[in-house]
């Protein structure tokens, strides 16, 4: 008698829960348990099961995987020259016209395949030779296969293209952008390639000028963006006054960027998630790459180790560069920075079958030393270390366990200046577990645990010299679960929630325990999909950001004070994606975001009892349009954003300084052959808000009474400002060009890249100096170049 579908699925889930509670190695068929020994999962004897009973449970579970006798294919896709995972590649069964995409680790799985047949597996990836493999599907078995693809004889080295993922008809991916390293290379560099600057060209992402890599997503502040490097939070990911990020593009394997509506596995931020996975390192041979630009020199070393690989990257700024003056209004700021990262991978079936172990670390430091006792010095650093274990089991279960430490430290050293000292430190010790089970129906169940113990310290000094620490310590414990309904071809749903068991601030005001999320996709026609997402998000850690600062050098992190409830946001997103042809697509998205309890500096603080921060609210909404055309050797990407952002504080509504009404980005590229690539980009946006000056008066400052020669010398001009951000700067636009050449010479791989920023030398205003009334412009006509050599 055939069991009903519901009963079968219920049994599957029950046996699955029991299975993951047991010690995995006991179930390994290669092990021979000793007769008469009882094994228990934990010391408190929650299970006491004999090996015979364990084997019986496993056989029952395998029978429940597919009651119809179907089979499945599981495996990985890697580069044949170095073993690097090829993320978001395409795997298709030719006879059935069904397939899957590889994930960020290069893994894929195709369930519920009619067994006792041989099929043709077509594996493809942009920039690689398509491969066809014959695979026999046995009943009630998962067929493992590892596939190596060979790069085409083109100008780009392996793994410089993150593949365009197979168009899955029911993919619930609204708000998600996968960023190609090839696309990064095509964009004008702004001195050198940088992932954060490239994000600013996506629809819905704004910046405040050429001199900063800080980005603002759909009306949210920059501290509402979560940056994850190999699963670990990176707190201050900026170099050199924010000119570019600390993440060296040479170490990146793949990037996923969620502009909003991100699903339940991500938490802790309100606006966006940038998830960066670095390369594993060359598993086939040792190699070295050396690069130089006008600002930095860097090196990369990678190679194999027994049953694994390693990669080490390092970058160091030059002590002096005239390019800095172009960014910083002809000021020779003594910027000095470095970053260093490494990753070590190990995978051996003799140790743990199906397991992969990763040890990774990262360090960066910036020093702004003026060499002048009358001026302040600023320095900050990031440190990171992590351990990760990724496991593929004999059942359709993947899980990953990680343990990490992330540290940020920043200091303002006043020397003999009148600036007050400031010191900030963040220590984040985290553990996370993520389980993913794939049903034969193609549906997926994911759940996990995130635990973070965060300690923040912020030392400030008032005008009388008294030092106070407004930092605190907290522990966050969250569990999440979600179910992806993918069994019907034209409809997909991802619904789940986060449950915050313990919060960082432990405030009684923090009542946001549940964070439900929902993403939907319905394919109306084969070429047209309708998509939507809704979700609630919370954030309990923030920076002290002064919205009036033109260039934000140092933004200290703190846990939100107990007197302010946790920040929260609600995302509403709708959209449609039309694949007009295989080479032409149009993506349209609309969003509406509500923000509550956003910590904002109290500009009207008078006495010490007044709060340093006030809870503000906000809202943002708009539309985004993205057009992509790819027909070798040409490609064209055009985006347009129309958006509104508002902030509400103490009954007053104003525009934040990153509110930009209209934004247009047009990028064209052509493969000229013989290793030559050319690209052109035009950028346009309407003016950003600013606060206008109405006048000034001479204000008496008492802080300097004992150091000044005369009381009259303490009178200084003080600006009288109009209502906040009511003015608008003029419109902004510029044209950039880029040309690159790749070639081999005496066995060495050379990459030469040249860019011209602001080709027609547009005088785009940055700000007005209130003290002098002088106009400060952004980047002028600026040629740059980068050269790299690979051994």
Image (cartoon, rainbow, N blue to C red):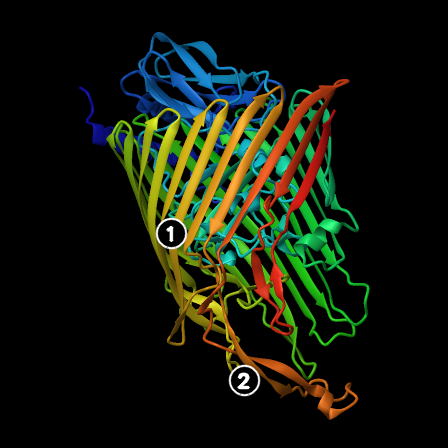
Q: Do the residues labelled 1 and 2 touch (CB within 8 Å)?
A: no
Q: Quick check: 646 left or right of 702?
A: left
Tell me the crowding category of disc 1: few under 14, some 14 to 19, or many 20 or more residues within 10 angstroms, Cα based. Answer: some
Q: 784 or 408, which lies in front?
A: 784
- Residue located at (37% from left, 15% from top): 93
The image quarter containing residue 710 is bottom right
Please, is residue 753 above or below residue 608 in the view? above
Per the image, label 1 sits on a secondary structure element best described as strand
- The mark found on residue 642 in the picture is 1
1 vs 2, front mark:
1
Tell me the crowding category of disc 2: few under 14, some 14 to 19, or many 20 or more residues within 10 angstroms, Cα based. Answer: few
Residue 712 in picture, x, y percent from top left: 72, 91
Q: 86 or 73, which lies in front?
A: 86
Q: Which of marks 1 and 2 is nearer the N terminus?
A: 2
Residue 773 in picture, x, y percent from top left: 61, 71
- Residue located at (74% from left, 71% from top): 414
Residue 581 in picture, x, y percent from top left: 34, 25
User: What residue would you read off at disc 2?
Assistant: 606
- Residue located at (59% from left, 34% from top): 185
Q: Quick check: 747 left or right of 521?
A: right
Q: Quick check: 194 left or right of 142?
A: right
- Residue located at (56% from left, 16% from top): 150
Query: Looking at this rendering, what residue extends furthest in the front direction?
Result: 760
Instruction: State the CA–CA distance, disc 1 to disc 2.
Output: 39 Å
Please, is residue 205 above or below residue 666 in the view? below
Looking at the rendered image, the quarter that the N terminus falls into is top left
């Amino acid at each position: 008698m055939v069991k009903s579908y519901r009963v079968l699925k219920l049994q599957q889930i029950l046996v699955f829960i029991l299975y993951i509670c047991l010690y995995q190695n006991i179930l390994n068929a290669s092990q021979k348990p000793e007769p008469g020994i009882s094994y228990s999962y934990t010391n408190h004897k929650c299970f006491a099961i004999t090996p015979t009973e364990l084997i019986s449970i496993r056989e029952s579970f395998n029978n429940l995987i597919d009651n119809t006798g179907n089979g499945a294919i599981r495996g990985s896709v890697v580069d044949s020259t170095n073993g690097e995972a090829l993320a978001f590649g395409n795997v298709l069964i030719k006879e059935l016209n069904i397939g899957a995409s590889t994930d960020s680790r290069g893994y894929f799985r195709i369930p519920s395949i009619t067994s006792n047949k041989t099929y043709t597996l077509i594996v493809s990836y942009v920039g690689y030779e398509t491969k066809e493999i014959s695979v026999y599907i046995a009943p009630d078995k998962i067929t493992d296969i590892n596939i190596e693809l060979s790069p085409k004889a083109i100008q780009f080295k392996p793994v410089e293209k993150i593949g365009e993922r197979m168009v899955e008809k029911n993919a619930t991916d609204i708000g998600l952008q996968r960023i190609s390293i090839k696309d990064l290379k095509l964009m004008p560099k702004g001195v050198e390639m940088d992932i954060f600057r490239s994000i600013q060209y996506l629809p819905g992402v704004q910046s405040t000028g050429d001199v900063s890599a800080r980005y603002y997503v759909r009306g949210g502040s920059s501290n509402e963006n979560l940056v994850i490097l190999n699963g670990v939070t990176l707190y201050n990911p900026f170099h050199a006054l924010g000119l570019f990020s600390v993440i060296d593009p040479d170490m990146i394997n793949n990037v996923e960027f969620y502009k909003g509506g991100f699903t339940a596995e991500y938490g802790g931020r309100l606006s966006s998630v940038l998830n960066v996975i670095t390369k594993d390192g060359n598993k086939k041979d040792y190699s070295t790459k050396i690069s130089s630009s006008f600002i930095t020199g860097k090196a990369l070393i990678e190679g194999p180790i027994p049953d694994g690989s390693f990669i080490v990257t390092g970058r160091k700024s030059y002590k002096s560069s005239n390019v800095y003056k172009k960014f910083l209004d002809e000021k020779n700021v003594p910027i000095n920075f470095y970053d260093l990262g490494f990753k070590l991978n190990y995978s051996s079936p003799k140790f743990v079958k199906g397991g992969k172990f990763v040890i990774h670390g990262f360090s960066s430091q910036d020093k702004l030393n003026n060499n002048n006792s009358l001026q302040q010095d600023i320095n900050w650093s990031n440190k990171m270390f992590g351990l990760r274990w990724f496991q593929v089991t004999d059942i359709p279960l993947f899980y990953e366990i990680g343990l990490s430490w992330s540290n940020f430290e920043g200091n303002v050293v006043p020397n003999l200046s009148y600036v007050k000292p400031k010191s900030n430190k963040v220590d984040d010790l985290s553990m996370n577990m993520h389980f993913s089970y794939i049903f034969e129906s193609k549906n997926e169940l994911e759940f996990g645990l995130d635990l973070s113990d965060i300690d923040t310290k912020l030392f400030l000094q008032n005008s009388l010299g008294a030092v106070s620490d407004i930092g605190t310590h907290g522990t966050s414990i969250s569990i999440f679960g979600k179910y992806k309904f993918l069994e019907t071809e034209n409809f997909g749903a991802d619904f789940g929630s986060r449950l915050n068991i313990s919060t960082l601030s432990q405030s009684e005001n923090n009542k946001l325990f549940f964070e439900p999320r929902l993403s939907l996709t319905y394919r109306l026609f084969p070429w047209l999909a309708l998509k939507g997402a809704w979700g609630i998000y919370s954030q309990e850690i923030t920076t002290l950001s002064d919205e009036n600062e033109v260039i934000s050098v140092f933004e200290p992190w703190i846990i939100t004070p107990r007197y302010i409830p946790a920040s929260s946001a609600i995302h509403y997103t709708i959209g449609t994606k039309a694949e007009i042809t295989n080479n032409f697509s149009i993506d349209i998205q609309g969003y509406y975001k509500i923000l509550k309890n956003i910590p904002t500096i109290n500009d009207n603080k008078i006495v010490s009892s007044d709060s340093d921060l006030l809870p503000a609210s906000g809202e943002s909404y708009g539309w985004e349009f993205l057009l992509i055309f790819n027909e070798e050797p040409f490609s064209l990407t055009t985006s347009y954003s129309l958006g509104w952002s508002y902030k509400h504080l103490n009954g007053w509504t104003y525009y934040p300084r990153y509110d930009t009404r209209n934004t247009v980005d047009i990028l064209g590229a052509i493969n000229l052959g013989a290793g030559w690539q050319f690209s052109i980009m035009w950028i346009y946006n309407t003016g950003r808000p600013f606060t206008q000056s109405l006048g000034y008066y001479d204000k008496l400052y008492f802080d300097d009474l004992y150091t000044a020669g005369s009381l009259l010398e303490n009178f200084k001009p003080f600006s009288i400002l109009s209502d906040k951000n009511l003015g608008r700067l003029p419109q902004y636009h510029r044209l950039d060009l880029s040309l690159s050449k790749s070639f081999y010479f005496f066995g060495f791989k050379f990459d030469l890249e040249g860019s011209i920023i602001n080709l027609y030398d547009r005088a785009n205003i940055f700000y007005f100096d209130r003290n002098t009334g002088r106009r400060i412009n952004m980047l002028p006509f600026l040629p740059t170049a980068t050269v790299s050599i690979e051994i």
